[in-house]
Image (cartoon, rainbow, N blue to C red):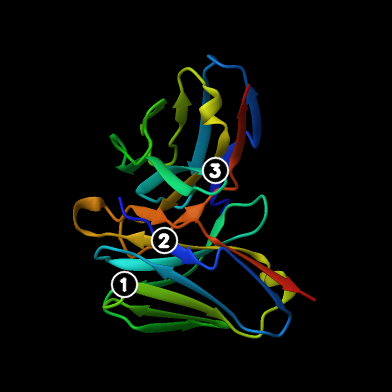
């Protein structure tokens, strides 16, 4: 099954800076989702972008999707120390897959106060 | 609503022992799934269910059994634990729409010695 590949694997920034994480994939998708995981906790859904959408916003989050390049990016603006977490992209292949999600390996974001 | 509840939070087993990881959700979600999370591997789908009485295999099903007798519960059984099953296990649920986000429990950390 296909899996998103995330880049970078780790990102360290100062509070107030923007953080950008990228996800690339190889086959067609129905939608792409981003999740956050704080240490020792379950994943929390951040945003879902459908294959026919190019950009979505939610608060300080901006997600783009380029289906021609098979890539997505997650931008967190004006980062805070509380944004420190792992971020995962997840792909929904659609069709007869019942929307099963396959997850990338994640980007570890550290925001220094 | 409690969301997705997993028990136990921690478990240590000896090789060959069996146990059941419990998962319950109170959101009336049709779709439920089990993932395991290992360092450097992201989350991998073990089994999933699209409704009571219906289960199917994910990416890494060997060594695990599931059943879905009610909408609320989706237990994961390890029949004969192996050290390779040492991992963090997450249960997740959503509505049966492919554009619905997954809701995760807080995980069960399993160690097999």
Residue B46 position (above or below residue A46): above
Circle 2 marks a residue in which chain? A
Q: Position of residue B94 (x, y in %)?
A: 40, 55
Q: Secondary structure under badge 1? A: loop
- Horizontal side of B77 relative to B67 (left or right) equals right
Query: Of the residues tagged 1 and 2, which is closer to the observer?
Result: 1
Q: CA distance from mark 1 to mark 3?
A: 26 Å
- Is disc 1 in the same subunit as disc 3? no
> Could you classify mark 3 by the number of other residues whose Cα lies within 10 Å: few (under 14), some (14-19), or many (20 or more)?
some
The residue nearer to you, when weighing B50 against A8, is A8
Q: CA distance from mark 2 to mark 3?
A: 16 Å
Residue B25 position (above or below residue A109): above
Res. A109 mark = none
Determine which residue is flagged by label 2: A90
The residue lying at 63 percent from left, 52 percent from top is A41
Looking at this view, name the residue that lies furthest to the top: B16
Determine which residue is flagged by label 3: B38
Where is residue A26, by image quadrant? bottom left
Determine which residue is flagged by label 1: A70
Q: Position of residue A110 (x, y in %)?
A: 69, 68
Q: Secondary structure under badge 3? A: strand
Q: Quadrant of the C terminus of chain B?
A: top right
Residue A19 position (above or below residue B82): below
- Horizontal side of B80 relative to A14 (left or right) equals left
Q: Position of residue A67 (x, y in %)?
A: 28, 76
The residue lying at 60 percent from left, 32 percent from top is B110
Looking at this view, name the residue that lies furthest to the right: A113
Circle 1 marks a residue in which chain? A
- Horizontal side of A6 relative to A102 (left or right) equals right
> Could you classify mark 1 by the number of other residues whose Cα lies within 10 Å: few (under 14), some (14-19), or many (20 or more)?
some
Q: CA distance from mark 1 to mark 2?
A: 13 Å
Q: Position of residue A71 (x, y in %)?
A: 37, 73
């Amino acid at each position: 099954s296909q899996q998103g590949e995330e880049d970078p694997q780790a990102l360290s920034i100062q509070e107030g800076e923007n953080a950008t994480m990228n996800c690339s994939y190889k086959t067609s998708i129905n939608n792409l989702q981003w999740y956050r995981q704080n240490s020792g906790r379950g994943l929390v859904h951040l945003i879902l972008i459908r294959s026919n959408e190019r950009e979505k916003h939610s608060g300080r989050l901006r997600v783009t999707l380029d289906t021609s390049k098979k890539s997505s990016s997650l931008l967190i603006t004006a980062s805070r120390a509380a944004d420190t977490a792992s971020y995962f992209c997840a792909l929904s292949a659609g069709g007869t897959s019942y929307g099963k999600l396959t997850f990338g390996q994640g980007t570890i974001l550290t925001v220094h106060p | 609503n409690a969301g997705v509840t997993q028990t136990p939070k921690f478990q240590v087993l000896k090789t060959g022992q069996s146990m059941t990881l419990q998962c319950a959700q109170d959101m009336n979600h049709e779709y439920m799934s089990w993932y395991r999370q290992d360092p450097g591997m992201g989350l991998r789908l073990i089994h999933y269910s699209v409704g009571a009485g219906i289960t199917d295999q994910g990416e890494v099903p060997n060594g695990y059994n599931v059943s879905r007798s009610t909408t609320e519960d989706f237990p994961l059984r390890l029949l004969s634990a192996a050290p390779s099953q040492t991992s963090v296990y997450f249960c997740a649920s959503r509505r049966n729409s492919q554009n619905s986000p997954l809701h995760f429990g807080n995980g069960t950390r399993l160690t097999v010695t």
